[in-house]
Image: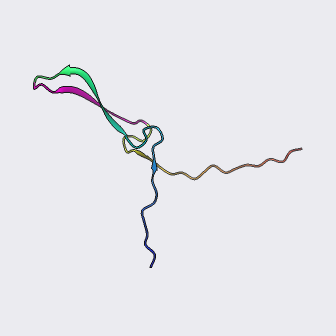
Amino acid sequence: MAQHGPAPTRICPDCDGFPAVAIDTGTLLDDGTRATLLITCRSCQGTGYTRTTAPAPVVQREHA
């Protein structure tokens, strides 16, 4: 019997699947930890994947 697998997902080309990074601001907080900013990829909104879309149709023109 055939097994159904999950649909293949496409990794985001802008972040290569690493959608969030923590950037150290250099500021020390009162408890001794460093202040960081969490930045997410704008293309995939922090998911690491993009939706697969159908390719655009190819239009062939005849040469006159």
For the C terminus, the image quarter is top right
Residue 39 versus residue 3: which sits nearer the camera? 3
The residue drawn where x is 63% and y is 49% is: 56
Q: How is the image coloured?
A: rainbow
Residue span colored magenta: 31-42
Q: Horizontally, is 27 left or right of 62 in the view?
A: left
Please tell me in which quadrant of the rendered image residue 43 appears. Answer: top left
Q: Is residue 10 left or right of residue 58?
A: left
Q: Is residue 48 magenta?
A: no
Q: Where is the N terminus found, in terms of image quarters? A: bottom left
Q: Picture coordinates of residue 62 (x, y %)? A: 84, 48
**Spot occupied by residue 3 in the image (x, y as percentages of width and height):** 43, 72
Q: Residue at the far left: name it.
A: 31
The mark total stands at 0
* Farthest right residue in view: 64
- Return the residue found at the far top: 27
Q: Does residue 4 lie above or below 46 as drawn? A: below
- Toward the bottom, the furthest residue is 1
Q: Can you give x and y, in whole percent of width and height, for residue 51 in the image?
A: 47, 49
17 left or right, relative to 25:
right
Q: Nearer the viewer, residue 42 or 24?
A: 24
Residue at 45% over, 43% down: 12
